[in-house]
Amino acid sequence: MRQHPDLLHDDVNRLFYKYLIPSISATLVTSIYILADTVMIGRGVGSLGIAALNILLPLFSLFFATGMMFGVGGSVLFSFAKGRKDDRDAREHFTAAFAGVVLMAVFYEVFCNLFFDQLTALLGRNEAMDGLVREYGRILVAGAPVFLLSSFLQAFVRNDKAPKTAMAAVIAGGVSNVFLDYLFIFPMGMGMAGGAVATVIGSVITVGILCTHFFSPHNSLKLTRNFKIRYIWEAVINGISSFVVDMANGIVIFLFNRQLLAYVGDLGVVVYGIISNSALIVNSVCNGISQAAQPIMAVNYGAGQNGRVEQTKKLGSICALAVGSIFTVVGILCTGLIIRIFVVPTEEIVEMAVPAVRIYFLAFLLMGMNLLNTTYFQSVHRPGNALTLSLLRGVVFNAALVFLLPLFMGVTGIWTTMPVTEVLTFLVGNALLKKNRIL
């Protein structure tokens, strides 16, 4: 009896839904690492703790995004080779991607420790939150190699026809993180450090379970002594759009924090801490939909079965629009509940947060479609289009609008930045799809 799905011949609908829940679970639980820290720190340390954590989120995004760059970029090439029945080339792509992620892990560990003060000052650390940022940030940096390996291995294990293993790994790590957050922050009174230690331990558990795949009889992720050095660069080129997609969260948080500190001070960063953590959840679900479609599209494109590629994208589009609509409605109708999950709301927080949440959540309508379009271009070997969409959504539109709109709309313009960004990205994505049809 066949244990693993046949991506080239099984029914596309069944394949997509077989990958959907494990992929969403994997990406969703990863965001719970930060979400659990935020909720526990908000309750155990206070609103200033949320502000300090939000200052450090771009670093976490950088580590996770780098692992995803090599993981998704390398695994797409790995899947192409598998579709061509070229196992030797597949092994070389895996080895090259692994070498790349190890090199970057060492670089981040050295660089971030040497320049910790300069980095955190750039991110927005001020006197009020200085001690809290240092307490959490030093431990976060120490765990950088584990965060990179976690996102890297998730992508490869999923592409090696083991989505359930990837799901089990991140669920186990996420559940452990939530439990340890509570234990370290409340009974043990470790404060910010407790949240950071819990996050690192959760990631270690995830990596440990992912590594069990290498002992599976169905494992085809084999390291080889000889590989083409240029394959490291090819993994970067193919995965750079994934890096930008994941790093976009960090870039947006950084830009928003700087603008909010300038316009309304620490209170704005607290409110944005609530919004950015909610956005992490939505982004994770939408990214899970894209990652469910990615191995199916990549393998079938490598085998020349373009009809199955388009069918998979259509299924992903339906799911993305449905999920985006649900999250938008929840944000508009349940605003008070969302705020209370993170903090004990004061009158000041409620006054600023209610309109901010309702405006920002409009962005979720099209977020999933934009992420899926980016993944589609990766999967059909159009890295230039994927990178264009990622850069426009994650850097160009955001950077321009977050500075431009507040000049006319005040702080409301900051909250409006993301909905306008998603609409503009969607329009560009549709134009690129019409220009680059594969059927």
Image: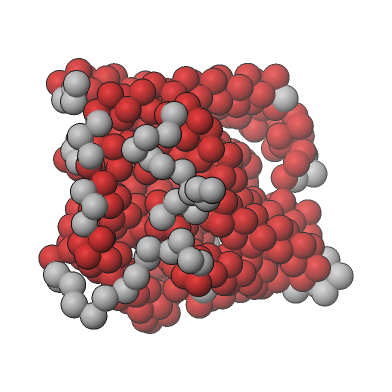
In this view, the residue in front, 10 or 159, is 10
Pinpoint residue 146: horizontal percent, then vertical percent: 49, 71
Q: Quadrant of residue 209?
A: bottom right
Pinpoint residue 100: horizontal percent, then vertical percent: 28, 69
Pinpoint residue 330: horizontal percent, then vertical percent: 66, 24
Determine if residue 113 is in view. Answer: yes
Horizontal side, residue 350 vs residue 318: left or right: right
Q: Is residue 1 above or below residue 423?
A: below
Q: Is residue 358 above or below residue 247?
A: above
Q: Please report the residue visible at 38 percent of the width from the left and 28 percent of the height from the top.
A: 312
Q: Which residue occupies the extreme right position in the image?
A: 187
Q: Quadrant of residue 374?
A: top left
Horizontal side, residue 193 vs residue 186: left or right: left
Q: Please report the residue visible at 49 percent of the width from the left and 53 percent of the height from the top.
A: 162
**Quadrant of the drawing holding the C terminus:** top left
In this view, the residue in front, 109 or 162, is 162
Determine if residue 269 is in view. Answer: no
Q: Is residue 351 above or below residue 87?
A: above
Q: Quadrant of residue 199?
A: bottom right
Question: Count the marks: how many?
Answer: 0
Pinpoint residue 57: horizontal percent, then vertical percent: 51, 56
Q: Please report the residue visible at 24 percent of the width from the left and 52 percent of the height from the top.
A: 85
Q: Please report the residue visible at 57 percent of the width from the left and 51 percent of the height from the top.
A: 164
